[in-house]
Amino acid sequence: MRHAFAALIALTALVVAASCAPYVMRGTVRQPATPVPALTLAASDGTPFTFAALRGRIALVYFGFTSCPDLCPTTLVDLTQVKKKLGDGAAKIAVAFVTLDPERDTPSTITRYLGLFDQSFIGLTGTADQLAAARSAFGVTATRREIPTSAMGYTIDHSSFIYVIDGAGQWCEQFERGTPVDDIVSDLRQLLTKDRGM
Amino acid sequence: MNARVRIATTILALTFAACGASTQALPSPTAATTVATATATPAPTPATITVSDAWARAGISAASDGTGAPMASATPGMGGAMGGASGATGATGNSAIYMTIKNSGPSADRLVKAACDAAGSTELHTAAMVNGVMQMRPVEAIDVPATGVATLAPGGFHVMLIGLKQDLKAGDSVKVTLTFERFGPLTIIAPVRVG
């Protein structure tokens, strides 16, 4: 009897502790968060773009190329799932795709490609210098690799992270390739709650 | 009454059939003889290849891009004037086909070629994360082990469609002819979906 009572106390303590424990972010949190780099890129309609334009929304930034048949579309499909699962919260999320292959990815190609996934995804390109500055600011690795044996001509070996910029323009977190959609959704819900005032 | 008798007879018949099947499966000399005579004509049975869960990823065709993508083929007369822009290299508008290939035969086989009318070129590729960097490379063949499975899935092996002739949209389907080293050609239909 005494044992049962002790067990009940222990269980209650556990439940209380769990409900009070602070939320642990599932992505890789940047300590401290840093302001999003002041970069100028080009939107797919040719107008200049800065990340300040997305202030007030959480921006998910991904670098890829439209000829990529495997990894890039897999990530973009995940991001469509993230938006679906967020429901109403999706209105506070912006997805930006920055090309790693401006040579082949014209603005219209990028727009049509993103349209396969979600019309609201923002396609970004720029001059070689602008894009190099963006890759360097986010620490993106991208190497053009010639493949003479393939009709592709060349491919781009690239790192694959989803970078998260919160509503206040702070680059606060990133997700590595293969992070489950539910983990991303969970972290974004947390950020949306925190940024309720934004 | 009659019905009950009929059911009983059926059950009895089924039981005997089942017995027959299991007898054949046993390595008893008589059963072996029966099997041998039944398939005596083609002496070595070829590896049996089947494909399931095939799908093609939705993709856009550069050819249907009305705004003039930097494609060499789109501006044949401009090559010299453009100074041979490197933008002409390779094709945009790609897709990938995924599937599970099952080999129920006793010999290993290899997928050595894929052909699809929907694209300018069809190749066998693999993708892999190497030190945090995603790399995609062509491969000569994809092994299908004896009584085993080869999986073509995102993040790994795929049939790569390069230079789509037209957009591939969810609901479309593509016909692909796979050629195996031992089994020979096998044509499949892969439905298109986004992911």
Image: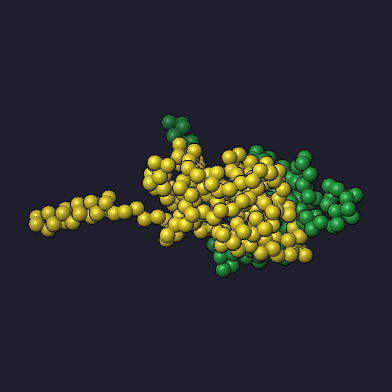
Chain colours: A yellow, B green
On the rendered structure, is B186 left or right of A116?
right
Quarter holding residue A193: top left
The residue at the far left in this view is: A2
- The quarter of the picture where residue A30 lies is bottom left
In the displayed structure image, the side of residue A23 where residue A17 appears, left or right: left
Say which of B94 and B49 sits in front.
Answer: B94
User: In the displayed structure, does residue A88 sit left or right of residue A38?
Assistant: left
Taking depth in this image into account, of B3 and A102 the one nearest to the observer is A102
| Residue at (54, 55) in percent of width and height | A37
Q: Is residue A95 visible?
A: yes
> What is the tally of numbered marks visible in this picture?
0
- Give x and y (percent) for residue B84: 85, 57
Residue B149 picture location, percent across and down: 60, 60
Residue B146 visible? The answer is no
Q: Residue at x 70, y 60 (%)?
A: A155
Name the spot of residue B34 as percent of width and height, x first.
64, 59
Placement of A132 over or under B5, stated as above or below = below
Query: For this view, does B59 lie left or right of residue A22?
Result: right
- Residue at the limit of the structure toward the front, as seen here: A38
Q: Camera-side residue: B5 or B39?
A: B39
Name the residue located 79 percent from the left edge and 44 percent from the top edge. B68
- The quadrant of the image that shows the N terminus of chain B is top left
Name the residue nearer the viewer: A133 or B139: A133
Residue A59 appears at what percent x and percent y? 51, 47
Quadrant in the picture for residue B184: bottom right
Looking at the image, the residue that sits furthest to the bottom is B131
